[in-house]
Image (cartoon, grey):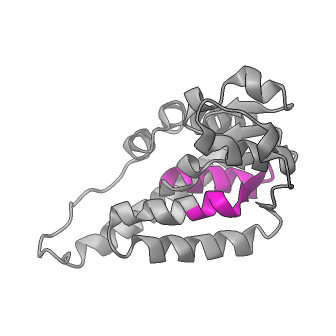
Amino acid sequence: MKLLLDTCVLYPTVMREMLLGAAQLGHFTPLWSERILGEWARAAVKIGPEGPAQAQAEIALLRAAWPKSDVAVKPGVAARLWLPDENDIHVLAAAVSGHADAIVTMNIKDFPRHLLAEEGLGRQGPDEVLYGLWLQDRAGIEAVGQRVLAEANRLAGNARSRKTQTGKIPSEQIWEMRPLLKKARLPRIAKALG
């Protein structure tokens, strides 16, 4: 199964790591385009001036781990497509060009199922994907969740060990599975793993 990952599911770290962890288990092949990755890098400015550089580093690692996942949009594909938000047509064009089975997105209203069905595509939310995969492979998805949780707590520990640029000490938060995944907007898999 091939799933095109929209920017909105790649940019949040926990969501991305859960999805790609499932892909590493062989549950699906992730796809994206140059433009989708570029949107991620531009959106990362929200986390501060270091955000775009951090995103570029993560994108480079992503490309190294998944060298065949970059989809080149075929000429003329985008011109024949229509979506309610024209800024999302490039996502649909990448899914069509990459022969994806579905688009994984949080932007449900921007990808009406009937329009995707015309192109032989489905639409799934990341929580829906992960919960469905957990039903098939509980041990595998639970192991992915444990790795993501351990990394979140490692990063939280690093943040606690240094002061931020403003001189404030970051939150002393130690994450548990359910709150971490709920914060990442993955409530069903949070309940399943929590």
Residue sitting farthest toward the top: 114
The residue sitting at 66% across, 56% down in the picture is 20
| Quarter of the image with the N terminus in it | top right
Name above or below for residue 33 compared with residue 49.
above
At a point 86% along the width and 55% down the height, the residue shown is 75
Residue 120 in view: yes
Point out residue 116 in the picture as x, y percentages from the top left corner.
76, 29
Residue 39's spot in the image, x, y percent?
55, 59
Picture quadrant of residue 109 = top right
Residue 140 falls inside the magenta stretch: no
Q: Residue 178 versus residue 112: which sits nearer the camera? A: 112
Quarter location, residue 170: bottom left
The quarter holding residue 92 reads top right
Residue at point 40% right, 47% down?
A: 180
Q: Residue 29: say if magenta.
A: yes
Q: Main secondary structure of the magenta part?
A: helix
Q: Is residue 138 visible?
A: no
Up the image or down, 153 lies above or below 136; here it is below
Q: Position of residue 125 (x, y in %)?
A: 61, 34
User: Residue at 72% across / 59% down in the picture?
Assistant: 33
Magenta highlight range: 14-38
Residue closer to the observer: 81 or 157: 81
**In the depicted view, which residue is nearer to us: 146 or 84?**
84
